[in-house]
Amino acid sequence: MVFGQVVIGPPGSGKTTYCNGMSQFLSLLGRKVAVVNLDPANDALPYECAINIEDLIKLSDVMAEHSLGPNGGLVYCMDYLEKNIDWLEEKLKPLIEGQVELFFLHSNARSVINKLIKKLNLRLTAVHLIDAHLCCEPGKYVSALLLSLSTMIHFELPHINVLSKIDLIENYGNLAFNLEFYTDVQDLSYLQHHLEQDPRSAKYRKLTKELCDVIDDFGLVNFSTLDIQDKESVGNLVKLIDKSNGYIFSSIDSSAVEFSKIAAAPLDWEYYRTAEVQEKYMKDDEFVQQTSRMQ
């Protein structure tokens, strides 16, 4: 059985840095890791990918040949990938023998991901990155909430929203509320006063209120935080992902009662999958040194 992450998020949210840092972290835990780039616009990756869509089709070639802009070119590339999914399946099969972590750095590839899940028996979690600096402006924060909600509904996968670059958030000014307000997505009515102070948002007051009500009514969105250079921060996120995609249940020969006990365990539970290497990575400076070079 293969476990993995579908890493998504708007431009600049830190997807490339995340995949680089997370793959290094999991490698230190002794896991087999493969990064799969399905984003044809990402043509300057700072690390080697096990599979790269550019080996099949290049966005620059599509734009030149068909006189398309970036958005049209991306749609064309994803359609082409879907029609040639056998190429991706054949590339993946040698990688998924035994336990492996896959990272799909993707753009607009829902149908491709769904086909791979069914054909190759993958267990995937969507990791949606949002730049933490968006919390500093109420209007941008509401936009990030809407994007996160629509993505959760669109993908229909186990889903974790992440405020990335949390270590840099203070560089953008003071937050109107404490950080827990933004991660837990508490009563959004408290944002109304701050939105009204912004002349760009004030005239859309009624629309903004209705949008906030939609987010509150669904009650689906919350955020984890991530500092990719901090081992504890990355480790906590790994535990969330392992629960959501079922990695912690793999190879457990036990009863349904034992499964439920594991599922209900707190985040600080050192589950058996990493117990043997927990001490190693907490003392090892290699991860911090490697991720620092990416910044």
Image (spheres, rainbow, N blue to C red):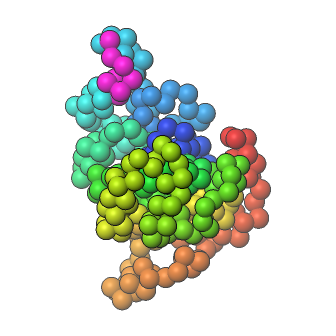
Nearer the observer, 123 or 93? 123
Left or right relative to 186: residue 291: right
Q: Give the quarter of the figure containing the N terminus.
A: bottom left
Left or right relative to 87: residue 97: right
Q: Where is residue 41 in the image (x, y as percent from the top left)?
A: 45, 28
Left or right relative to 3: residue 137: right
Reply yes or no: does residue 72 show up in magenta.
yes
Q: Where is residue 81 in the image (x, y as percent from the top left)?
A: 29, 31
Can residue 129 be seen here? The reply is no
x 73%, y 46%: residue: 292
Left or right relative to 75: residue 259: right
Reply yes or no: does residue 36 show up in magenta.
no
| Residue 35 against residue 44 in the figure, above or below | below
x 62%, y 67%: residue: 178
Judged by its main secondary structure, the magenta piece is helix
Can residue 178 be seen here? The reply is yes
Q: Where is residue 164 in the image (x, y as percent from the top left)?
A: 57, 52
Q: Where is residue 224 in the image (x, y as percent from the top left)?
A: 53, 63
x 37%, y 11%: residue: 64
| Residue 153 against residue 185 in the figure, above or below | above
The mark total stands at 0
Magenta-highlighted residues: 67-74
Q: Give the quarter of the figure containing the C terminus.
A: top right
Nearer the observer, 112 or 273? 112
**Residue sitting at the far bottom:** 257
| Residue 62 against residue 224 in the figure, above or below | above
x 24%, y 53%: residue: 118
